[in-house]
Image (cartoon, helix red, strand yellow):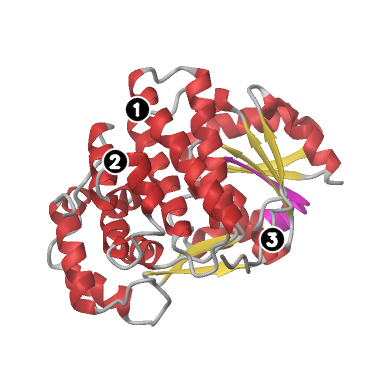
Amino acid sequence: MSRDFIYSGSPAHIVFGEGKSAAAGEWVEKLGCAKAFVLSTPQQRADAEALAARLGSLAVGVFAGAVMHTPVDVTEEAMEVVLRTQADCVVSLGGGSTTGLGKAIAYRTDLHQIVIPTTYAGSEVTPILGQTEGGRKTTVRHASILPEVVIYDPALTLGLPVGMSVTSGLNAMAHAVEALYAQDRNPISTLMAAEGLRAFKTSLPDIVAVPRDADVRADALYGAWLCGTVLGTVGMALHHKICHTLGGTFDTPHADTHAIMLPHTAAYNAAAVPELLAPVADIFGGSVGGGLWDFASQIGSPQALKDLGLSETDLDRAAEIATENPYWNPRPIDRQSIRALLQDAWQGKRPA
């Protein structure tokens, strides 16, 4: 069997353990920095201000304006504060929205980043930035986008609402599923993807049952790290293209969109590469798409795009945008097939 492949490991420092976020100041200093700019969403402003207070003289300000899909105008607003405070690093506290803003700032300035995730997005360990401007979401991959330090503290996720935990976890799982059939996959990425999926297969139902169990939350963060890391080493295809289309153009919620689309995009590609997606069927049972749909249903995930406010008339435009620029996918893409896939996802149908 041929073993030809290329693998590049992530240079990021991963700090994992309960209470480890208290060491954020130490990591600021280890990076040779002294002016940390703390980022969060408006909902997490109080937590960000508390973090800045713990950093003491190492903190130069707080920007609590991060929002979904990383709009360029919000990044430009934050950049004004970065320049005014002469910040030399950013500390991003929160989920994918905050991490995205920190990445956008680093891409423009090459500032060091410390990320303290409070969801299971997984984007904190990828060199990929998705940002929105003019109703379109585009992605860029660059070494400066990868955060230097990620601190996974399960204690910070104990209060994450169950519904958000579920969709955030499914979002991370989508990274791993797409990595299994990536054009540039390798044996290590496949092992990490399968291990990440197994971590969520056990942890997400347990979170639904016992939301404040620190060990279960740690298992989910472990899965997020694996799924995010593997996405950072391989390319993306149909699933992320569709989700970026829906989020960037129609402003659908990021994690919910990934959660709903995952069974459908996986089923679509399983028709072409069943052997590559066999780990999904093994872990979740049954068919690839059906197994993922059943698992999402079991843990209470949203399952229909129409429930996100997307109208049926939007589907034609979404299919057009998702297929207008050629990109690699293991199964050929055409507008009619993607329109049918979106219809099923809009209705919330179980993939056949």
Image quarter where the N terminus lies is bottom right
| Dot label at residue 178 | none
Q: Which residue in the structure is indicated by mark 1?
A: 205
Q: CA distance from mark 3 to mark 1?
A: 33 Å
> Who is closer to the viewer here, 182 or 129?
182
Q: Amino acid at mark 2?
A: Gly
Image location (x, y in percent) of residue 210:
38, 17
Would you say the residues marked 3 and 2 are in contact, meaning their CB atoms lie under 8 Å apart? no
State whether residue 41 appears in this view: no
Instruction: Give the amino acid type for the residue marked by disc 3 in the picture.
Output: Ser
Q: Is residue 6 above or below residue 157?
A: below
Instruction: From the viewer's perspective, tell me whether residue 190 is left or right of residue 167.
Output: right
For marks 3 and 2, the one nearer the N-term is 3
Quarter of the image with the C terminus is: bottom left
Q: Is residue 111 left or right of residue 146?
A: right
Dot 2: element: loop
First in residue order: circle 2 vs circle 1: 1
Q: Is residue 176 left or right of residue 107?
A: left
In the picture of the structure, the residue carrying the numbered disc 2 is 285
- Give percent across and percent down for residue 329: 39, 72
User: Image quadrant of residue 261?
Assistant: bottom left
Q: Does residue 221 lie above or below 337 as drawn? A: above
- Distance from Cα at disc 3 to Cα at disc 2: 32 Å
Q: Residues within 10 Å of mark 1 (few under 14, many from 20)?
A: some
**Residue corresponding to mark 3:** 8
Secondary element type, mark 3 = loop
